[in-house]
Amino acid sequence: MTNSTWLCTAFGLVLGTVPVNATQSAGPNAAFAPAYSVEQTWYDADGKFFRKDVGTLYFRDRVGFFIRSILDDDRPGEPDVFFVSDLSELPGVGLRLETGNVEYQGHRTTEGFEVAAVTKGSSGRSYTVMLTAKAIQLPPANRSGLYDMTSTTVFVVDGDRGDKAMDWTGTAAIALVRDTVHLSMVMNNGAGGDAGLSGSSPLASKGSFRIWMADKHKEFIGQFGGPGGLQGHWVVWTDSTTRFEGDASGTRF
């Protein structure tokens, strides 16, 4: 048994398996909390403590972030922001978390979930990472988190606005760190279509920001409102003369 396997087993997490005491849900993303407080501990290949991180993690509908700080003398350092690309659970498979190009496996706990991964650091050395997440409710004044989004768009062709509106609903994940807004948003319409965008932007003095995806011809101009509020206008160009656009509003949860 390797030291990494011993560590995972000691924490009740065996990579590639589902512990018999794992709490399983009915399907992907079922009953996940809006946000989690996270602690993760790194061990080297010999099972020796390497470092500890703390942070906040949230995910829903293909969008989410992990805001992580490395502890130095028990004090959090400058936070880094990582996209969360998956947090899901399936019967017989277990819980899967993917963030920062690292795939974790684990199970539910009464307070949240526990997962583990084996990854390599910047030096190329292998580490076992144990991550414990506890469900929390973010303060209303916190701009970071998940937002329920609604929007109505129209098509614009050669500058002429169409008269047929399309309604959209979706989720936006926002991480506001060091006066920079990180946004990831997915929207779905009643016709079965979807659209998404992501990016980062400096936060202006009055709470506004602009996400521009030049390679995909997408734009979101946002403005934070009262506690938990987000207003914006988004545009998606389908070709050089055609786009759809509309106002969007969101409420953090």
Image (cartoon, grey):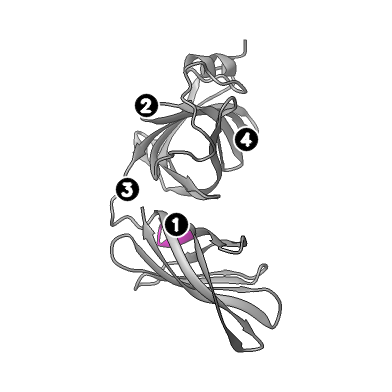
**Residue visible at 36% across and 37% down in the picture:** 135
Q: Of the residues shown, which amino acid type is indicated by label 3?
A: Leu
Name the mark on residue 123: 4
Name the mark on residue 110: 2
* Horizontal and vertical percent position of residue 164: 56, 79
Q: Which residues are magenta?
A: 174-182
Q: Nearer the viewer, mark 2 or mark 3?
A: 2
Q: Say if the magenta span includes residue 159.
A: no
Q: Nearer the viewer, mark 2 or mark 1?
A: 2
Q: Of the residues shown, which amino acid type is indicated by label 4?
A: Ser
Residue ID for mark 1: 174
Among all residues in the image, which is located at the extreme right?
A: 239
Alpha carbon separation for disc pair 2 and 3: 19 Å
**Residue visible at 62% across and 13% down in the picture:** 2
Q: Nearer the viewer, mark 2 or mark 4?
A: 2
The answer to which of marks 1 and 3 sits earlier in the sequence is: 3
Q: Say if the magenta span includes residue 180.
A: yes
Label 1 with label 3: CB-CB less than 8 Å: no
The answer to which of marks 2 and 4 sits earlier in the sequence is: 2
The answer to which of marks 2 and 1 sits earlier in the sequence is: 2
Alpha carbon separation for disc pair 1 and 3: 13 Å
Instruction: Using a 10 Å C-alpha cutoff, classify the residue at mark 1 as few (fewer than 14 neighbours), some (14 to 19) or many (20 or more).
Output: many
The answer to which of marks 3 and 4 sits earlier in the sequence is: 4
